[in-house]
Amino acid sequence: MPIDEALLERMLLRESVSEFLYREADLLDERRYTEWLDMLAEDYQYSVPLRMNVAFGETDAREETRAGREICWFDEGKETMSLRVDQLNTGLHWAEEPVSRISHLVTNIRLDAVELPEVAVSCRFLVYRNRVADETDFLVGRRKDRLRQVGDSWHVVRRELLLDQSVLLAKNLSIFV
Amino acid sequence: MTTVEEPTRTGAPQVRNLVDVKNGEISREIFIDEQIFKNELENLFPRAWLFVGHATQVPEPGDFFSSWMGADPVLLTRDDKGELNVLLNSCRHRGMRVCRYDEGNTLQFTCPYHAWSYSIDGSLVDTPGALHGVPQQKAAYGTNLEREKWGLVRAAQVHNYKGLVFANWDPEAPSFDEYVGDFHWWLDNLADAFDGTEGGTEAFRGVHKWRIRSNWKFVSENFLGDTYHGASTHASVEAVGIGPGGKGKRRHGERQNEGGFSKGRMKTSFRRGHGASDNLAYEIPYPEFEEAELDEYFVAAWEKRKEKLQAEGRLLGGRGPATLFPNMSFAAGFPRTILVAHPISPTETEVWRWYLVDKSAPEKVRDWLRHYYMRYAGPAGMTEQDDMENWDYATEASRGVVARRYPYNYQQGLGQETASDLDGSVHSHHAIAGEVNARAFYRRWAEFVDNLSWPELTELARVDDRATERDAVVTDVAEGVKVLDAVDVVDGPPAQ
C-alpha cells in the first residue's frame, strides 16, 4: 500500500503539537510555572473575552467582548503572565494558599492551518480546580492557539479562550486557564 | 447580644441589638442568619437608592441593559425621548423574565410565555414599559383588561447622576441628593473626568460578573474604609508590583513621599451609612508612569482640575475606595471602577464590576487603563483575587454554632472620631487603624433592616452624635495629621 506522505506529515505534526499541549498541561498541574513560562513566546498574547446573553441574530455583533478594546477576563501579554507567576511564587497569595488541586484536560485537538513555522490549533479545554474542601470549579470552553516552531518544540504565540460562562461561577481566576 | 430577639409586632427580629456600636461588637448572625437576610431583602433593598448601571451603556433609544436591584431583576432602558427608565424584568401575567439578554436594542419586550408585550417606546404607549400587546385580548378579556394598569413595574424614582444611574422602589424615599448628602463629592470624582469635566466619563463595554460564597456585607465593608486589610491581604500583589510605575511599583501608584497613608489620609464616615477611605482635604497625586505620553495626559488633567476646583472653592481629595450605602462600592482614582454586591443568599453574592474611563482619553491612555484594570480588579485581578478568599472563608468559618456565639470586633478607634466639616460625618482618628466607617455602616444597616419609618430614619441621620456627644479631641483633619505624625509612623499599603 502506498504511503500518503502528505497525510503522514500532517499526522506527525499534529502528534507533535498534541504532545506539546499535553506537556504544557502537566507543567501547569505540577505547578512548574517558571518552566511553563518558557513555553510562551516573548510576543505571547492571551485573551479571554466576556461572554454575554444576546439575541440570536446579534451573536456576531455582541456575544463576546473584544480583546484589545473592551473588558475581558484576561487580555494580556507575557509580561503580565510573568507577574502572575511571581505572585504565585510569593507564598503569600492567599487565593492559592493552600494551593489548589488542578487538572487541565485538553481535547478535540485539530490543526486549523499549517503555515510553518507557525500552526493554528483549535481544541477544547476543561480545567478542574478543587481547593480546601468542597470548593470546586469547572471551567470549560473552546480554545484557539497559534504555535511557533522553535527547534524541535513549540512556543505558544497567541491564545484565545472562549469560556462557556457569562457569570463566572468560580470566585476568582487565580489559576492559569 | 448574640441571639436574635423575639419577633416584634411586625414579626421581624430586632437586629439593632446585634449591632453594638458603643462597644464595637457586631454579632456574626447578621452575616449568616436566614431570617435577617430576608429582612434585608424586605426592608433595606427596596427602600435604598441602588446603582443600576451607567448611562453610556444605553446611549441610543431602544438600548437596554439587564441589571439587578436587591433580589429583583430590572431593565435599564432608554426610550425614544432619550429618557432613562428602570423596569422590573418580570411579566405581569405569569412572572416570566421578559428579557434574558444582558444587553441589546429593542423597542419592546415580548414575553416568550404568552406573548404579552411591553413597549419602551413612548410613541406607542403613554408610559415606557406599559403593556402594549396582548394576544387574543378581545376573546380573553373583552373590554375588561385595563392595559394601563398592567405595564412592567417601574422603579418609583430614577436618578441619573452624571451618568451614574440609580433607582429606588420606594416613592416615599428621600430624593437621591438627600440620601447621598455630602458624600456626593466622592461620586463627583468618580463620574467627572480626571481633568474635572463634569460627567466626563464612560463605562468600558463589559461588566465583570462573578459569584462568591460570602455575605454581601463583607464586600461593602471592605471598600467602605477597611484600609487595615491591605498590608496582609494584598502582600503578594504588593511584593510583585502591578502599578502605573511598572514592575516593582506600588499597585495604586501613589507617590508615597508626597502623601498617601503615611501622611494621615483619614477616613470619612457618614451618619447615613456611606463611608470613604479618605477625606476631601487629602489629594492623591497622579501616579508616576514609565511612559512619558501617559505622564503628560495625567499631569495636564491634574493641573486643569486643580485650577477648576480651586476656582470653585473645592477641595481636591475624595477618591475612595468608598461605599455608597448599602452595596455600591467604588474607587475614583487608580483604578476607577464601580462594584455592586448583589445579595443572593446570606452566604452567596453576585459581584458586578464596571470600569470607567475619561471620554476624551486618547487611545494610549484608554488602553493602558484597561490593561491595568484587568490585572488589578475583578476575579482575575491580582489584587481582588485575594479579597474573595478572605470573604468566602470568613463567611464559612462564621457559620458554626459555637462561632456564632462570638461577635466580631469593631473596636478600632472607638470613641476617637474627629469632627468633620461635611454634613453628618466624622473622620477616623487614624489613617489605617480605624473602624468608625464600619460601625456607622452597620448602625444604619440595622435601622433600615428593623424597618424604621422614613421620618425616623431621617431624624436619626439629621445629627451626627459621634462628633457632638463629647469634646472633640481633635477638631479637624489637618490637626489630626499633626497629632498623628507626632505619635505614630504609619506605613502600610492602602486598601482594596
Image (cartoon, coloured by chain):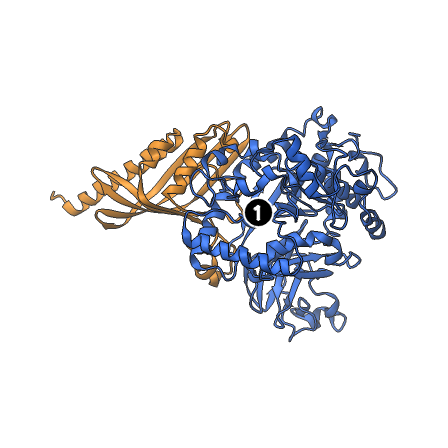
Chain colours: A orange, B blue
Q: Residue furthest bottom?
A: B123
Residue type at tag 1: Ile
Please state which of residues B136 and B104 is positioned toward the viewer in this rendering.
B104
Q: Is residue B79 found left or right of B411 in the rendered image?
A: left
Considering only vertical position in the picture, is A30 above or below A68?
above
Instruction: Find disc 1 in the rendering and name its residue.
Output: B284
Q: Is residue B304 found left or right of B88 in the rendered image?
A: left
Q: Quadrant of the C terminus of chain A?
A: top left
Q: Position of residue A40 (x, y in %)?
A: 32, 40
Q: Is residue B68 visible?
A: yes
Q: Residue furthest right?
A: B9
Please state which of residues A144 and B436 is positioned toward the viewer in this rendering.
B436
Q: Position of residue B153 (x, y in %)?
A: 71, 61
Q: Is residue B465 found left or right of B258 in the rendered image?
A: right
Q: Position of residue B132 (x, y in %)?
A: 66, 70
Residue for point 63% across, 71% down = B121
Q: How many marks?
A: 1
Q: Is residue A125 visible?
A: no
